[in-house]
Image (cartoon, rainbow, N blue to C red):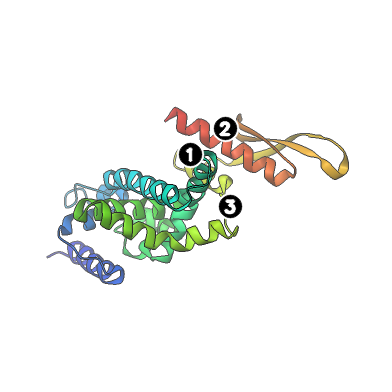
Amino acid sequence: MNSLSQKKEENFHRLLKQLSLRCNNEHLYKMALTHGSFAYENRLLVQENNQRLEFLGDAVLELTVSDYLYRTYPNYTEGELTKLRATIVCASSIARVASQLNLGAYLMMGRGEEKSGGRERPSILADAFEALLGAVYLDHGWEAACKFALSCLKPIIEDVFAGRLERDYKTELQEVLQQRSPEPVQYIILNEKGPPHNKVFTAAVIYRNQEIGRGEGYSKKEAESQAAAQALEKWRKDE
């Protein structure tokens, strides 16, 4: 066994032990820990990465949280449930879960990506958790995947309902755009209206010299957040 294969094997078993996961198909979990940069740098040894599992895990995660909220809060409206789900499953929340599990330490990652801080990058951590969830789903089925996801998300859900966590649209947008280009995102205040005690601000988010979102709020921070939210919504529709 070469050193790369040995390291991958060690990471795999360490993670399973930490998470108390029973494994039927080792290949799935090893793939979940393989970032695309590692597969690219070692393409003679590794042909797969965690992107397809991340795609599957993302769907499992959204349905898990939707099912949990629907059953647990029967008096909430569709709009309230949607807002709660969005906060729980947003990239920053899932990255926090992955960070608490220390997933970054177990990832097989290319040297360039690692040097640039990839093990702490929220988007990479969130993708890794979703890939791991996808592996659990394929290995053990829906009930096990749902149980695993909710156990990991418990602190996030508790914070959301205690009012300690709000969706960070600006950070989420930054993560999305950085995957395309390192160019900076800028926010500008376009307008202020109303009396001093009840002002309404209008903000725009600028990327590559173009306005990509606009929002209003009773503070500059809220207006910028809403501008980022609109930009994210447009981006998802265009995907």
Residue at 44 percent across and 54 percent down: it is 94
Report crowding for label 1: few under 14, some 14 to 19, many 20 or more residues within 10 A (C-alpha).
few
Amino acid at dot 2: Arg
Residue at 22 percent across and 63 percent down: it is 8
How many marks can you see? 3
Residue 166 disc label: 3
Q: Is residue 231 above or below residue 218?
A: above
Q: How far apart are marks 1 and 3 (CA)?
A: 26 Å
Residue 132 disc label: none
Occupied quadrant, residue 162 = bottom right
User: Which badge, 1 or 2, comes first in the chain's sequence?
Assistant: 1
Of badges 1 and 3, nearer the viewer stands: 3
Q: Can residue 33 be seen in this view?
A: no
- Which residue is disc 2 drawn over? 208
Q: Distance between the residues labelled 1 and 2?
A: 9 Å
Occupied quadrant, residue 139 = bottom left
For numbered disc 1, what is the local secondary structure?
loop
Given residues 229 and 33, the one toward you in this image is: 229
Amino acid at dot 1: Ser
Q: Where is residue 173 in the image (x, y as percent from the top left)?
A: 53, 42
Residue at 35 percent across and 65 percent down: it is 105
- Which residue is disc 1 drawn over? 181
Q: In this view, does 23 lie above or below 89?
A: below
Q: Is residue 187 visible?
A: yes
Say whether residue 214 is left or right of residue 6. right
Q: Is residue 7 above or below residue 237?
A: below
Q: Do the residues labelled 2 and 3 touch (CB within 8 Å)?
A: no
Q: Where is residue 52 in the image (x, y as percent from the top left)?
A: 27, 43
Q: Are marks 1 and 2 in contact (CB under 8 Å)?
A: yes
